[in-house]
Every structure is written in structure tokens, then in C-alpha cells.
Amino acid sequence: MIDENGQSPALVAGMVAVTKRDLLLAWKRPGDVMNSLLFFAIVSTLFPLAVGPSPEQLEFSGPGVLWVAALLAALLSLNSLFLTDYEDGSLDQMIVSPLPLPLLALGKTIAHWLTSGLPLVLVSPVLAITFRMHWSVTGVLMLTLMLGTISLSLVGSIGAALTVGLHRGTALLSLLILPLMMPVLIFGARTVSLAAAGDGVAAGTYFLAAYAMLALSLAPFATAAALRISNE
Amino acid sequence: MTAKLSGNDLTLFRGERCLFQHLQFALDPGELLILEGSNGSGKTSLLRAIVGMLELETGVIHWDGKPVRGQRQLFHSSLVWMAHRVGFKADLTLLENLRFEAALRPASNNDLDRILVRLGIDRLTRLPLRSLSAGQQRRVSLARMLLSDAPLWLMDEPFTNLDREGRDLVVKLVSEHVQVGGMCVIAAHQDVQIDAPTQKVRL
């Protein structure tokens, strides 16, 4: 039995256990993580080859290209967020566990960000070099990408939960998620451009942080509700 | 007096098709409920409705005299469900899976070694679940039941894929569980002979 006072440690332990399990799974099958990283790297390195080596052009298009590539790369891995759990019955077991489903969904989302969003943030400085990005701008790029990928994992988990029961739900998932991510893309890429031009970046960063906080507080509940519907 | 677990006037539709209607059951501690029916008759759906995953057309499931809907967390902490699908990760080892299971259900029994020996899977702990046979995976699902101290066991076709010895083991585990005041709901398409106070619901 769960006693009234001892609830919160068990709750957090449950969430941490989900995150740990998914990280362990990602460790055993590194292909999924590498997939989105490779996609990000390939798109970002092909782009300079296509538009030509002119420094002005690269500096001008760099923030936008890196942001779009990162967003699409993170989106790639979103489809499988709940899919294997749905197929092998783990999702059923999570739903009938006494722990609140929003917390377990949040645990999975955290693991998703750690294996898809965070690696993108970490390799972005390397790719920024191909766009001749100044190191101070690279810092802004990493910060905004971090906030942006957090939002994407959280908002994306709602879409992944809604489409988990559908076969080939990837296209639908993108349609559901991308409109919600437009503000993040606009503010993220624009903030990096502003930093490159030497302007202030506080406003854009605050917006991205606020969006991430809003997603953090609402998305787990929406995801849990969506999982219950999809798993009927 | 109200039963511990009961359902009355249960009706369930899947699409246009009516799986069952006006079904009732009442189960008290120390009793066994067997859901009989051919393939596709709605046994699994009834189990899913009991745990609250499927929306019933009519009828309410009660636990302790109160609707399950209003006390989902309490109800879920009182049950373990052996579903048709194993519910463990094929890429993780038995131990890793069971460790996760223990975190998912904080009310867990700690005597893991004894349980694994009893189920005959104590030598498989370091193998990924993917490499176990279907019957061995079934035994791993049984470990989930034994690890928890929940009074209510829900079992969906527990005899599938098991050898004769395994089937006898399930019978023994269930009758032991019922004897100490537990409850068990078994969905099965073949005859089940378990020495315990038994009710049957035909679907």
C-alpha cells in the first residue's frame, strides 16, 4: 500500500525509473539516437555546399538552417516515443500501475529529450563552424536550441501519444506538432540571427523559456489523456 | 453485504458489435472468477474494462462498494494484470525488467531469488528477454504477479504457451493466492480446473 506521507518519494522514483529504463534501452540500441544526429549533421553540412561558399550568405542563412534541421531531426525520433511500449504491452502495464500516468509520460519525455534533443544541442557548435558562426553566437544557438528541443519533446509527446495506435502515423504526427512549434522556430532562429547582428537576445530567450515552462506544466497531462484514448 | 469486486449490468460494444450485455459478477476475497468463452467473445475486453481501459456502454465496476472510476489509483495498487502481451522490454534482461517493475508498483515483495527459482527462470536473469522462448516469457509475466502483494490477480489466458509443468504451476499459484484471501479473475478458452471456490461467467 502507498501510505499518505510516503507518496512523493515513490512518485518521483517511478518517474526516474521510467527515464532510466528508456535511457538503458537507447544505450542498447544506439541506432535510433544516431539516426537523428546523422540527419542533423547531413542537412547542415549539405546546405553550405548547395548555396555556395560566400561568407555573407552562410552567416545570413546559418541560424535558420541549423534551427530547421534540428527541429526536423528531433521530430524524426518522436514517432517511436510510445510505439514500442504500445506494441509490447508495457504501455498497458504503465496505465494500470498505481503511479499517475502524467508522471510516467513525463519520465518518458525526459528520456526522449536526453537521447534526441540534448545530443543535437551538443553537436550544434561543430556544425555552426560550417556557417562561420562566431563563438558567442554559438552560445546563443545552444541555449535557444536547448529550450526549443525541450518544448518539442514535450509538445511532441502529445502528438506521439495521439497517433500511437495508428499505423504510419508519422505524417499525421508532423501535421499535429509543426503548427505548435512554429512560434518556437520563429523566435529561436530569429534570436540567433539577432545575436549574430550584435543585438539583444533576452526577449527571444525569455519567450522560448516561457514556452518550455508552459509545455512542461501542461503537456504531461495532455499526453496521459491522449494515451488513455489511443490505448482503448 | 457488497462484494469486494463487482460489476453489474455490464454492456460493451466494439464498433457496431455487442460483445456482451447485462453481464454481472461479484467476487469476494478467497474466490476465483473464470471468464469462459471462445476466441473473440470479449474476455480480454472485459478484463480491459475492469481495469478501466475500455469505456463500458452501461454498468459500473465496483471495488469495495465504490465505483472504480473515482479511486483509480487505489484500485490499481490493489491489482496486477497478466495481459496477453508480456509487457516487458525485449531488449532488457529479466533482472532489468523486474527492477523497473518494482519501481512501477511500490508495493513489491522483495524475495526475488525465491520467486525466480520457483518459476524455474532463475538461470535466465542475465539474458535479454528477446532470447527467451514464449513459454519462458510467460513465466516472467508470472513473476510480476508474485512480486506484487496486490490482492487481485487478473490473468488473460494464463495457460497459453506453457508446458504441462508450467500449467500445473499456474494452477498451484492461483489456488495458493486464493487460499490466503486473494482474488483471481481468469480469462480462458479451455476448461480450467482449480481447487478453489469458483464462479463462472460465460461470454
Image (spheres, coloured by chain):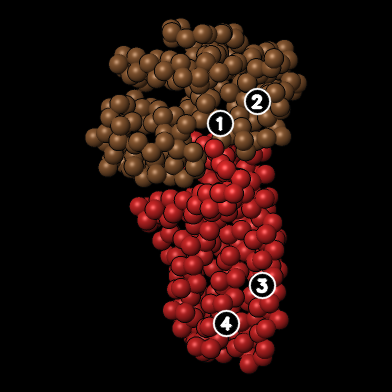
Chain colours: A red, B brown
Q: Nearer the viewer, mark 3 or mark 2?
A: 2
Residue lying at the far bottom of the rendered structure: A198
Q: Residue at x 48, y 62 (%)?
A: A114
Q: Nearer the viewer, mark 2 or mark 4?
A: 2
Q: Secondary structure at mark 3?
A: helix
- What amino acid is labelled 3 in the image? Leu
Which residue lies under the disc numbered 4?
Answer: A140
Residue lying at the far left of the rendered structure: B123
Q: Are marks 2 and 1 on the same chain?
A: yes
Q: Is residue B175 left or right of residue B187?
A: left
- The Cα atoms of the two marked residues, 2 and 1, are separated by 10 Å
What is the x, y in percent for residue A134?
51, 89
- What amino acid is labelled 1 in the image? Ser
Q: Is residue A24 left or right of residue B156?
A: left
Specify the quadrant of the image occupied by residue A67. bottom right
- The Cα atoms of the two marked residues, 3 and 2, are separated by 46 Å
In this rendered view, identify the residue nearer to me: B3 or A81.
B3
